[in-house]
DNA sequence: GTCAAAATGTTTCCACTGTAAACTTTATAG
DNA sequence: CTATAAAGTTTACAGTGGAAACATTTTGAC
């Protein structure tokens, strides 16, 4: 029902997102254009409008797939090393690894003006990523263990630290020599866990 | 020597950067174009080429001015509250405040592909910002006080945490309810200081 | 089955963008 | 005073996203 190859593509929507992800890897954000996605899919440059409305819609769908992949990267690490003493380590490493491996996609995902940042699907998938980080930081305490919102504070610190390290790494702002032997796990604070 | 207003502008280079900063505040990164900067400055759209070469050159100059302003914001807080017990607090607040107040400029500053990220002037001014963060974190210790690179680890954590919080705040990813009553100082870890 | 209607793609056109080339005007150095 | 460099303009061009009118296919109601 999908491979007639005549007039209708079959599942153009998914194919366009795939093309966008490929272009992002090959040419970065600068090379990602609506027309390039359409051409790579073998379709006219106005065809995407039927599925995504406009460029922002397409970029939003690409970013959403990015969050999907980010969640998978983190989850895969968690599954592969479920007995790790600090559960968060696998998720942290996955987060940073994703940012460094796919810098253009990572930038798009956290770019406010390019995407429809209130898109329900985007919010849902992004929420799943942050839920993973929230889960692995559950039970994390800090010196404000008895302060109100202690858990929320720990989660925000958790996320801010890993996201900052990931973005600085991906944008090349961190000293190369430092990067060589210091990773996120080397600077991540030794939280205490509740029993 | 600058206000003849005939053929030569006088100091077009600075005026174009000023225009770019204004557009960034009013219309965001999407509205920032070479032609818009030129028009606002009252000059033909190819005039910038003489001073910046191409679009990347102009964006690089704008980003550089952004780092200048970021350093000023942090330094101003430090000067205004020199007796603060934790020197770093003023710098941290300045960093986050800058990101939230100028989200478009902040995104441009940390965007790798838009600017000439190896421009000497850009590197110099960016370095001054990170030097401020490095200075206020001097003497910061952590539980790996006796580990090698202890100071470097503390600095990287310091910077990653504040940058992550700033970027997540600016890109609207942090829960609005959380933002209402929790700021960077609420989640910033209580480092110990050496005597 | 038939056929109107909706979905999906195409063609054509337009305004806008950055860049290059040739040209004009002003400032400056010798 | 004048050759030359610096600073701006005009013109042209390829690429971008979007709108409108059109063509083709699928689907749903009868």
Image (spheres, coloured by chain):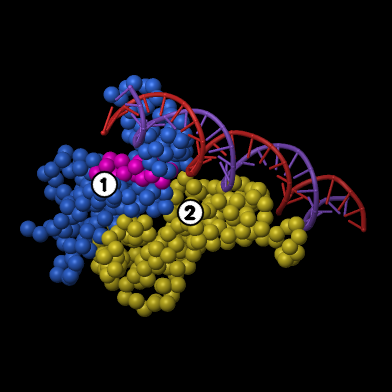
Chain colours: A yellow, B blue, C red, D purple
Residue A149 can be seen, yes or no: no
- Classify the position of the C terminus of chain B by image quarter: bottom left
As for residue A168 lying within the magenta part, the answer is no
The number of numbered discs placed on residues in the rendered structure image is 2
Task: List x then y, in percent, for residue A70.
Answer: 46, 63
Tell which of A149 and B52 is nearer to you.
B52
Which residue carries the number 2 mark? A29
Chief secondary structure of the magenta portion: helix
Tell which of B140 and C26 is nearer to you.
C26
Which residue is at a point 44% across and 50% down the rendered structure image?
A: A111
Range covered by the magenta-colored residues: B55-71
Task: List x then y, in percent, for residue A162.
Answer: 34, 61
Relative side of A111 to B79, left or right: right
Which residue is at a point 28% across and 47% down the rendered structure image?
A: B121
Chain of the residue on which disc 1 is drawn: B
Q: Is residue A4 above or below residue A110?
A: below
Which residue carries the number 1 mark? B125
Task: List x then y, in percent, for residue B158.
Answer: 24, 57
């Amino acid at each position: 029902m999908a491979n007639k190859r005549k007039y209708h593509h079959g599942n153009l929507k998914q194919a366009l997102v795939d093309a966008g992800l490929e272009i992002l890897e090959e040419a970065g954000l600068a090379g990602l254009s609506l027309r390039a996605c359409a051409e790579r899919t073998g379709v006219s440059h106005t065809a995407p409008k039927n599925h995504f409305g406009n460029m922002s819609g397409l970029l939003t769908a690409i970013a959403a797939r990015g969050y999907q992949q980010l969640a998978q990267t983190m989850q895969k690490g968690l599954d592969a090393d479920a007995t790790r003493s600090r559960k968060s380590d696998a998720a942290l490493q996955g987060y940073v690894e994703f940012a460094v491996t796919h810098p253009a996609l990572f930038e798009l995902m956290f770019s406010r003006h390019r995407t429809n940042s209130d898109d329900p699907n985007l919010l849902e998938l992004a929420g799943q990523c942050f839920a993973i980080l929230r889960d692995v930081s559950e039970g994390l305490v800090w010196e404000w263990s008895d302060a109100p919102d202690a858990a929320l504070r720990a989660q925000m610190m958790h996320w801010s630290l890993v996201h900052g390290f990931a973005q600085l790494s991906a944008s090349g702002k961190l000293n190369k020599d430092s990067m060589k032997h210091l990773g996120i796990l080397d600077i991540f604070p030794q939280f205490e866990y509740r029993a």
